[in-house]
Structures are given as structure tokens and as C-alpha cells.
Image: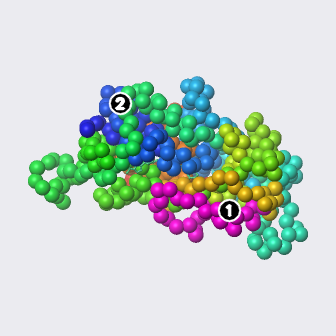
Amino acid sequence: MKCDILVIGAGILGLSSAFHLKKQNPEKRIIVIDRLAGPGQGNTSKSAGGFRDIFTAGSNLPLAESTISWFDHLQGEQGYKVGFAHTTYLWLLSEKRHREMEDSFRTAESKGVDFKVYEEEQLNQLIPDLNTDFSDDDEAELMGLTPVKIGVQGLNCGIIDTDALTKAYESLFLELGGEIQYNTTAHKLELKPEIELGIPGEPFVWQEPVVSGVQTSRGPIEAGTTVVAAGAWSGTLLDPIGYPSMMKPKTRMIFVFKDPRLSGLYGTSGFNRYNVLPLTQLPNIKIYLKADLSEGSLWLGVSEDIGREFKLYDEPEAEERLYSENVYYSLTKHLPCFNDVRPINMWGGQRAINSVDKQPVVDSMTGMIYVGAASGNGIIKSDALGRIVAAKYSGETEAELFNGDSYEVSRLSIKSRKVDKEDF
Ligand SMILES: Cc1cc2nc3c(=O)[nH]c(=O)nc-3n(C[C@H](O)[C@H](O)[C@H](O)COP(=O)(O)OP(=O)(O)OC[C@H]3O[C@@H](n4cnc5c(N)ncnc54)[C@H](O)[C@@H]3O)c2cc1C
């Protein structure tokens, strides 16, 4: 099989790239392949589907801002029901943590990010389940926990249904005449020399190597350009040809709760028009809660940093013990309504982490573009990254984002990388 562009991976980044590539190049034959049976079934479907514009880096903020406006447009004007809801984000902070983060919030605000700040008393009124008084709690002191004193709410933030979002990109791509083959695994990227001599063993060291396609479970596919958008699995294709993926896979788990004892917390009113708890980050304990509108459940995500191995898993198992023997003790100090409550569902997914600057990569060599290392922010930045891939393919130096902003394409490359320090 032959095509102009082959995209490996039908996750959010592969499908967004495929759609923007096809939109800019309607005459080209573009094929997406995925080893799984449908769109977004890799780590996209495992994500919490949170979106936020709370970033400080000039290289990050435009990616999120423009993707959020695109989500709004997709649902509002294009009529795709993608569950885009401004439920907002809420950072619950101890005094110390607030002091540490104050400058970062101020920097984000100076860049146009919309915040609202809540004092302890207001938080107690809005979230009656929140315990902000640890004064007689020796155990909390022993555990090094500090109570919440300040809440910072990000207003242009919320949640989206990632399954519906990937299906929307899939339909947009197919409507333009794009092709998708599921249940097709890419085994190996093919390298050939730019000028072929037809001698066995090419490319030799003096020849310029070019990615010419891929060996798949259904036979070879020859492609003018191969886009590697294989998420956490990108290294399995890039490592064998010695191309740096700049990322390592790490597991993150989500626990789901639906219990009458949590209905008050789920239905927290006063923060958004849905009258649900915002996507809420708890202090000290690296966990967040999300009210899932489709099922009326609360999701708890755990973002461990040091202590969790970097390792590639196809289906990482959720560890119930992480909740019951670890998170539970600190969670119930802040939110006693979780006492004796156990999850009804749980899963693990993998984030492709760029451990150096935590920002995505869009890089290329002749015949190949790589998009990935989204570091847990792939949904938030998906549309902008797809547009940057399409601009890179066309040899443009600037990508035009949905909201009209220009983004320098080489900023996210490996050699000419120009990313700023990110506080969040
Ligand atoms: C628990 C969890 C919570 C998260 N929460 C958020 C959040 O709130 N907000 C946010 O923005 N991001 C979040 N993320 C991160 C987000 O899920 C990812 O950044 C995003 O899904 C990456 O998209 P992708 O297309 O690169 O990867 P994937 O969705 O994994 O897509 C890669 C695809 O490539 C396919 N593939 C791989 N290898 C091959 C091969 N050899 N041949 C053919 N196909 C192949 C896979 O089957 C897969 O479908 C979260 C992640 C996790 C795990």
C-alpha cells in the first residue's frame, strides 16, 4: 500500500494531526493506522479529560488557549456533542503552598488567565465537606498535612468527554476523505537512503537516511511522510532507528466513586453553572477530584512523581492499594466524607512524560514527523499540536492556531527548541 502521509496512532494527537493535515492537503492520500479497534482507545480514553489555560510559559499557554477555543467552537458552532463544560479548576492551597505559588498565579494573571480567589470562610460555606481545621488533629500533624486556607479558581478551565472528542476528529477526518485502518500494528519504521543505489545494506553511513514507510501487521505501507503519534509507545518505533523520543512512559491511576456519602461534594454549588465540584486539586497530596457529568460520579486522579517507575505497559493495572493504603489516609483528613468509601471502578493509563521541560515535542527528519511527549497535557493542547504538525509538513515556519495566534513551528522541535519555564 502507498500513501502520501501515514499517521501511526489514532489517539487524540494522531487524529488531530490527521484532520489538520487533510484539511490543508485535500488532494493527498492520508491513512491513519492504529493497533487497537477504534479511535482514542490508547491512553486518550484513560485520561481525566480536564482542560485548563493555567500555564505561565509562552510556549504552553497559546497551545491551551487556542485548543480550548476550538473545543468551544466544535461543540457550539459545529454541533459535536463533546461534553465540553466549563466546570472550572480549583486549587485548594495551604498558606505555605499559596505563598509559594502566589507569584506563579500573578504571572499567569498578567498573561490574561482568569482567576478568582476564595478565603477559608468562603470555602467552608461553598464546600461544607471540606475540613479546614487540623488544630486538634495530632495525626494530621504527624503526617505533615497542612489544612486548606485559600482556594484559587481557574475560570477558563473544565472537562471534556475524550471519547466523544476523538470520535469528532475521526468524523472530521473521514468526511474530508481520510482513511483509517484499525487493528493494524506498525512493527518497524523503514529507512532508505535519499538517493537509492539499490545495493543491499543501504542506507550506508555516507547516505542521508529517510523514513520511507512502515512494516505493519498487514504488510508494508510506503509513505511520503510518516507521522509517529503513538503516544507512550512512540519509543518502540523511534528507539530502533536511534531517533530520540524525548519521553518516558509513566502510569497514572484513576479511581471512580459513586456513593450517597459523596453526593454533597459532587453537587457542590456556587462555582459553576453545572453546580458540581470543579476539577479540584488538593494540597500536599498530589491528588485531584473531578465531577464526571455523564455518570454523576467523582473521579480521583493520583499524580505520583518520585516513587513511580518509568516503564511501558500496554494495560497498566490500577492498584487498589494505592487508594486504600495510601491516598485514603490524607484524603479523609481534608474530606472526611470519604470515610469508609471505596471506589466502584479504577484504571491505570500512561502519560508520555518529557522529563526535561514537561512540554510537547513536534520534531521531524526527512520522511517523518514525530508528535508526542505531551506529559499529561495531550488533550489540553491537542488541536494546536495538530495544526503545528500540519504546518511542519507544509514547511511553514509559523502555524496559525484556531484563535488566530501564530506559533513558531520550530519551538517544539528537539534541535531548535525554544520553550519557556513552566510554573504549573
Ligand atoms: C490517568 C490519566 C489522566 C490524564 N488526564 C489528562 C487530562 O486531564 N488532561 C489532559 O490534557 N491530558 C490528560 N492525560 C494525558 C492524555 O491522556 C495524553 O496526553 C493524550 O491522550 C496523548 O494522546 P496521544 O494521541 O499521544 O496518545 P494515545 O491516546 O495513547 O494514542 C496513541 C495511539 O497509538 C497507538 N499505537 C501505539 N503504538 C502503535 C503501533 N506500533 N502501531 C499502531 N498503533 C500504535 C495506540 O494504540 C494509541 O491508540 C491523562 C493521562 C492519563 C493516563
Please, is residue 165 above or below residue 265 in the view? above
Name the residue type under label 1: Tyr
The one nearer the camera, 271 or 363, is 271
Task: Say whether residue 353 is visible.
Answer: no
Q: CA distance from mark 2 to mark 1?
A: 48 Å
User: Along the horizontal axis of the image, is 344 left or right of 370?
Assistant: right
Q: Nearer the viewer, mark 2 or mark 1?
A: 1
Q: Residue furthest front?
A: 344
In the rendered structure, find residue 25 and report the number of the disc placed on it.
2
Residue occupying image coordinates x 12% and y 55%: 200
Range covered by the magenta-colored residues: 303-332
Label 2: state its secondary structure: loop
Name the residue type under label 2: Asn
Residue occupying image coordinates x 38% and y 31%: 178
Which of the 4 image quadrants contains residue 104?
A: bottom right
In the rendered structure, find residue 323 and report the number of the disc placed on it.
1
Where does residue 198 sit, x and y in percent of width and height? 11, 50
Residue occupying image coordinates x 37% and y 57%: 236
Can residue 317 be found in the magenta stretch? yes
User: Along the horizontal axis of the image, is 24 left or right of 44?
Assistant: left
